[in-house]
Structure formats: C-alpha cells, structure tokens
Amino acid sequence: MKDMSWESYRIFLEVARQGGLTGASQVSGLSPATVGRRVLQVEEAMGRPLFLRSQTGYRLTSEGQALFEQLQGMEAIARGVESWRQEGQGTSTVRLMAGTWVTWLVCENFSAICTERDPFRLDLSISERRATLTHREVDVGIRAVEPTEPSLISRHAGEVAYAAYRRKNSGEALAGRWLAVSQEDAVSAYLRWPHEREADTIAVIVSRPRSLLDIVRAGAGQAVLPCFVGDLDPALERAGEEIRALRHHQWVVTNSEDRHRRDIRAVSDRLFRLLRSHADLFAGKRPSRT
Amino acid sequence: MKDMSWESYRIFLEVARQGGLTGASQVSGLSPATVGRRVLQVEEAMGRPLFLRSQTGYRLTSEGQALFEQLQGMEAIARGVESWRQEGQGTSTVRLMAGTWVTWLVCENFSAICTERDPFRLDLSISERRATLTHREVDVGIRAVEPTEPSLISRHAGEVAYAAYRRKNSGEALAGRWLAVSQEDAVSAYLRWPHEREADTIAVIVSRPRSLLDIVRAGAGQAVLPCFVGDLDPALERAGEEIRALRHHQWVVTNSEDRHRRDIRAVSDRLFRLLRSHADLFAGKRPSRT
DNA sequence: GACATGTCTTTCATGGATGAAAAACATAGT
DNA sequence: ACTATGTTTTTCATCCATGAAAGACATGTC
C-alpha cells in the first residue's frame, strides 16, 4: 500500500486537538469537507477507528489517542524547524505560557521581560492547564508542580500564597457573598476552593478568573486571589488569613532542547528574576504598597 | 506567511538522501518536475538556499544539512507510526542491516533468524556504511565500533579476524595476484588493505565485496576475507597468517525506543546467538569444516 | 413541541497541482 | 570532436483534490 501523506498527519492532529472538523478547518484554512476526507484517509490507512464521530464533534478513540501522542513528536520537530527558519531571518518568537495572574504580572512589568531593543517577538498565552513544553507548544512556562520529564529544565521560583479579598472598608457586609468562576472553568485549586468550602454562599459566577479581580474591586463580594494580586491592589484588603491549604510552589520551565537559544534563555532568565524579586509578595508577606 | 506543507518536508528529505530529483522521483512516485517544484517551495519558505544545483544532481548546502538533520527526526517518528500501523494488522516488519558477509551468514542460516511461523517480515539490507539506527532507518544492525549514542543498546558479539585466501592447492603461483574492490567502494578497513599494502600487484578489481569470494574460488588470485567466510569454504585455504591489524570487535545494536517490540527482540536475540555460536570461526580459530 | 443552532456529510463544478514530453545542459567515454 | 547518457528545467494539457452549498442530523432553547 502507498503510504500516508504527512500532510494528513498534520490535519489529523488538528482535528484531534480541536475536537472536530469545524475547528480544524478554521485553524488549517481548509474546508470541513476536505478535513473530513483527510481524516478518513488516515483512518483507512491505519486500519482502525481513530475517532468517535457524533453530530457534536470528533472524539479520539484509545487507538486514536495512541496515534495522537506519536504524531505530536512530529509536530514538535516541525515547530523546531519553524523557529530555525525564523532564526535565519533574524526574527524569532518566544512563546510564554502562564496562568491568569502571572500573565497579569508580566503585563504590568512588561519592560522587564521584553523591550523594543530585543530582536524577538513574544507570544503570551494564558492557560490554566499544564503547558506541554515537551512538544514545544510553548518555550517557557510556569508550573505549580515540579516537572518530572527529563527533557525539561526547571528553576524554583518560590511559593505562592492565597487569601480571600474584599473591597477596603466594606466591613463584614460581604462576608456571605462569595465570588467564583463557573465550576467547569475551575481547574486550579484556588478556583475550586469556593465551590468546595462555600458553595452555599456563592453570589456571583464569572467565566474568567481575571474578572474576579474586577468584581471584587467593584465591591460585589469576596473572592480568593493570590496574595501578590490582592496585596498589590490598594483598593482591596484581606477578608481573612492566608488559606494555607492552597499554598504551592512554582517553577519556571523550559525545554532542554532549546536551552541554547539566546532569546528563550533571555526570557526565561528575566521571568525568573521578576518572580524572585516579588518573592515576598508571592509568599503573602504583605509588604507596604508601592 | 502560510506555513510549509509537511509533505514537502518529506520530499525534501528524499531529494537530500537520493542526491537529486530523479532518484527522489523514483522512490516517491512523483515526477521529477513536481519534486523540483516542491523543493523550490521549501527553499523559498526557509528563505535560504538549501541545495547546490548542478546538471549532475543536488547537493546539500550547510544550511540544507541543518534542515536535513532536523527533519530526519520527523521521518523517524513517521517510521514509528508505520510500524504501529503494521502491528495493528498483525503483520510487522523487522529491518536488519549488516555488512556483506554477516548478511551472507544470515542467509546461510536463515532459519535460525526467521521461520515461516514467525509473524513478522524481515527486510535484509546490505550496506558497508554505518546504519543510522538513531533515526530508525533500521531496527537491528551490526556495528564494528561500540555505539556511543545513548539511544542505542548494544551487545558485544565477539571479534572478527581477517586473512588472505586463495584456491586450495593453487600453490604460490597466485602470490602476486591480488583481488580487490574498486577504491571508491573500499569503505571498510579490510577492503582498503590491498590498496594500501599491495597496490602494485592488484590484478582484478570488482565492484562488490561479494564478488571477491567468487573470483577467489575461480582461482583468479588471492583476496582478503573474513576468516569465518574463508575458513568455512572447503575450496579455499589461507594464503598467510591472520592479518592482526584488521581484527575488530562487533556489536549487535538496536534502538532502545523499540526495545519493547517482541519481533525486534526476537531477531536481535537470534542474531546474537548465531554470531556467538560462530564465535570461534569469527575469531579465526579454524575449526574443522561442517 | 417547534425552532434555532451547530455539527458532520454529500454533491458537484472548478482550478491548481501534477505528469508527459521536450528542451537544455553537463559529463563521460570513444 | 562527437556521441551517448543522465541530469535538471520548461511547457502545456489533464485530472484529481478542493471548496461552496445544500442536506442530514443531533442538541439545546423557548
């Protein structure tokens, strides 16, 4: 049999990642019809079902999952080639993935990470889920657990403390009004905390963690926030002690294969220094406001 | 810019490996015209010259070489997927690469390596050059030097001795008539030896090492052969002592990523046992003929 | 229960990638 | 010097992969 086109592999990956033909068709620029046909090709070539089809989308079978994991390796290399290409044109890209609040801190201190004199572009992507650095989806990431993968190198950047916050001088009026993100978006421990401990008194639900800060400042209630966010905001005050159960460490992680790249090294170093310089704030030691 | 088609990557690899459009077009089934166009695409996308074009073929530039090495990783994964596919259909393939003489020995003892009851196919490829197991071009290989790559696992299979051979009872008449392979094909030490030590008295040149055995048996002169080949042939006798300078070790090597595959394990084990059981012959200890 | 929405799938006409053949061009051999 | 061979490159007609649009089908909403 004539062997599979590598291009179909790429399309397969996109369908698997997007969970359907429509999503894949958008990111790939092909029509859903074509995407469907290519996936069919791959399935026939592999001689086994790879997707569970439904009107609502495609879901990987266990065999599809096995193929997906293999092909991610190809994608990783393709991304490596892409950055090699950019390198040759003097214009590189560093992809930095972090959670909502570290991203927020990076934005606030953007000039400490990337200046107009730097010869690289910065792609900031926000995600609460674990960054898959192994497959080079991103170059630099923040993790709350120490990576075990041998292909990653990590540097410990201190601890992160959490507490409940409310608008200053709002008194005890808000004690029973908790703010939280919707349960399906509550992927981190601090986001699940209100659901687990104060489910009865949740007054407002928002879809993005970032909105928590906004509605707390508006005086709508109290919400769990990282101390470095709450303590830095002059309009907020703690509505209780630090919640010790939520405390965790954090690491700056990079892919060891890209260790040599100056741009990635620079971003990683600067991010690390930024986090270290805020170590007391992260740890919840309530320094005086700037 | 829209990114490169993975299919073009594969075509690039084939052109680089075959050294031209014609070769690549044959193995890929595409026309030379198309192959040329796809390569042009890749070059434009990468923004740098990848090949030195001439009427005699394509040669990689240093930048092309850099790309080639990256993309070989993709190819390795694609091969992994291919064997996963075969596995799912109960029909796997084990690719065994060895030099001329070990291959010959394997053929003579084929049933010791692979029987009709085995559920896998065997691809035997002869090559004097080092097998690139790292990129999974082959699954099992024979090496004359111990591999240093951490991704490979190797087992020492004894030593190999060499000597000059001639037809039995041909006396000293052939002493001045050496047989050798053409100089450009003399990639191994034992093949270079006649050129380095007896260049003036080379009487016959052949293009394949395998032909050396045939013309020695025909009584055309004397040639350097591995002892396990010469000593096993009842029509030949040694035309001198063992040539100690040529003695070397040999290892059976497999890719550690495929360690788990039963079929590869089986072939590797059997090959190892076959070599060990002939260890005395390999080492030139002249046992009685079978 | 009807309806709106978002999927996947099928149909069919089109255009861009493709191959055959010729041309252009080196290299090697006589 | 000339021919034979094996390249790459160009030209042009063809055909196959592709996209638009319609169809089929679930799911959730009012």
Image (cartoon, coloured by chain):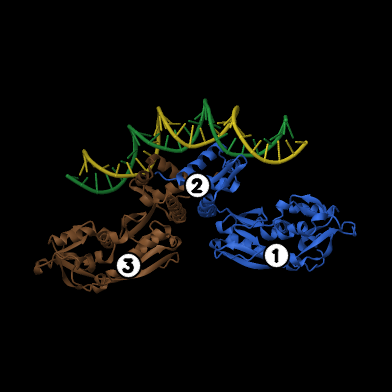
Chain colours: A brown, B blue, C yellow, D green
- N-terminal of the two: label 2 or label 1? 2
Q: Secondary structure at mark 2?
A: helix
C-alpha distance separating marks 1 and 3? 58 Å
Q: Amino acid at mark 3?
A: Arg
Q: Amino acid at mark 1?
A: Leu
Horizontal side, residue B238 vs residue B121: left or right: right
Residue where numbered disc 2 is placed: B9
Identified at 80% across, 52% down, the residue is B214
Quarter of the image that includes the N terminus of chain A: top right
Of circles 3 and 2, which is in front?
3
Horizontal side, residue A77 vs residue D6: left or right: left
Residue where numbered disc 1 is placed: B275
**Dividing the picture into quarters, in which one does residue B35 lie?**
top right
Query: Which mark, by number, is residue B147?
Result: none
Q: Position of residue B157 (x, y in %)?
A: 67, 67
* Label tally: 3
Q: Position of residue B208 (x, y in %)?
A: 74, 51
Specify whether disc 3 shares its chain with disc 2: no
Q: Position of residue B68 (x, y in %)?
A: 53, 51
Residue where numbered disc 3 is placed: A273
Q: Determine crowd level at label 2: few under 14, some 14-19, many 20+ residues with C-alpha closer than 10 A.
A: many
C-alpha distance separating marks 2 and 1? 39 Å
Badge 2: chain ID: B
